[in-house]
Image (tube, rainbow, N blue to C red):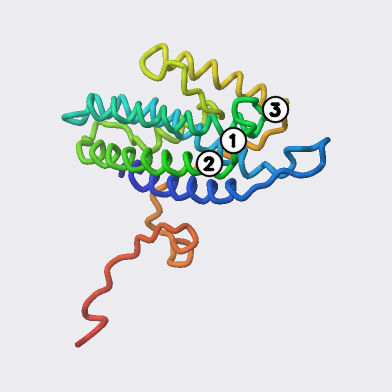
């Protein structure tokens, strides 16, 4: 079983939930610790940046090699993911006091992020569904490959680095190392990406809390007319 489509569904839900928490975060009035109330923003920014970079590294090449109109679809997705990264970079700029974003209200920034996240998720979901539909026995588990790519993806948005091919891989590797240095130096919260497993044996209560129900159809004999 390929975990790509169900895994993306869970990841997208997580990103929306973390965005909701980030959007209501407010700065502290303590001038010595201005970012103490921003862990929710850091968490969302890191999660979204990681997932976006991993999708570019995994889904785009898969689409080009497996989907009939994959090249065109990949080009469309890359352009959208870059718009999403630009919106995320405004969050980073505002959070770290950049003069380019300091005068812009948070409400305006979050509005852009919500719009670009929704559009990115929609394109990503459609692309993943088509990749899954064309999967053969020789293909890897794309969902597992996406998860592993997230583990080594940059934790901050980098909209202006190369995104594809060997230049893209090199740029993401360098960006991840730089991001990792600053994450440690700043004590930044970087959550692990979600890892979706096939869960055939989960009970009903577990499925409920995981928001991933896969209960079997009830036997009609159990409910006589």
Q: Which residue is mark 3?
A: 184
Q: Which residue is mark 2?
A: 108
- Left or right of residue 9, residue 219 in this image: left
Q: Position of residue 143 (x, y in %)?
A: 37, 38
Task: Specify the quadrant of the image occupied by residue 65.
Answer: top left
Against 98, is 169 above or below? above
- Say few, some or many: other residues with alpha carbon within 10 Å of mark 1 (under 14 / 14 to 19 / 20 or more): few
Q: Residue at x 53, y 41 (%)?
A: 108
Q: Position of residue 192 (x, y in %)?
A: 56, 39
Closer to the chain start, of discs 1 and 3, is 1
Q: Residue at x 76, y 44 (%)?
A: 28
The reply to whether the C-beta atoms of the residues labelled 2 and 3 are less than 8 Å apart is: no
The reply to whether the C-beta atoms of the residues labelled 2 and 1 are less than 8 Å apart is: yes
Q: Which residue is mark 1?
A: 104
Q: Position of residue 214 (x, y in %)?
A: 35, 60
The residue nearer to you, when weighing 31 against 205, is 31
């Amino acid at each position: 079983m390929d975990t790509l489509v169900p895994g993306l569904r869970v990841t997208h839900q997580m990103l929306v939930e973390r965005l909701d928490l980030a959007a209501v975060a407010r700065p502290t009035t303590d001038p010595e610790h201005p970012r103490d109330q921003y862990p929710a923003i850091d968490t969302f920014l890191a999660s979204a940046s990681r997932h976006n970079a991993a999708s570019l590294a995994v889904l785009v090449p898969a689409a080009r090699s497996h989907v009939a109109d994959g090249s065109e679809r990949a080009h469309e997705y890359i352009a959208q993911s870059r718009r999403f990264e630009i919106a995320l970079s405004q969050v980073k700029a505002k959070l770290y006091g950049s003069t380019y974003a300091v005068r812009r209200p948070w409400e305006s920034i979050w509005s852009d992020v919500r719009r670009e996240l929704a559009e990115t998720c929609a394109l990503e979901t459609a692309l993943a569904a088509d990749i899954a539909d064309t999967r053969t026995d020789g293909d890897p588990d794309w969902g597992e490959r996406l998860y592993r790519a997230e583990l080594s993806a940059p934790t901050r948005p980098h909209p202006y680095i190369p995104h594809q091919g060997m230049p893209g891989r090199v740029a993401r590797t360098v960006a991840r190392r730089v991001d990792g240095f600053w994450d440690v130096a700043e004590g930044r919260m970087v959550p692990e990406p979600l890892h979706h497993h096939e869960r055939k044996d989960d009970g009903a209560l577990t499925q409920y809390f995981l928001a991933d129900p896969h209960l079997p159809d009830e036997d009609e004999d159990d409910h006589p007319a």
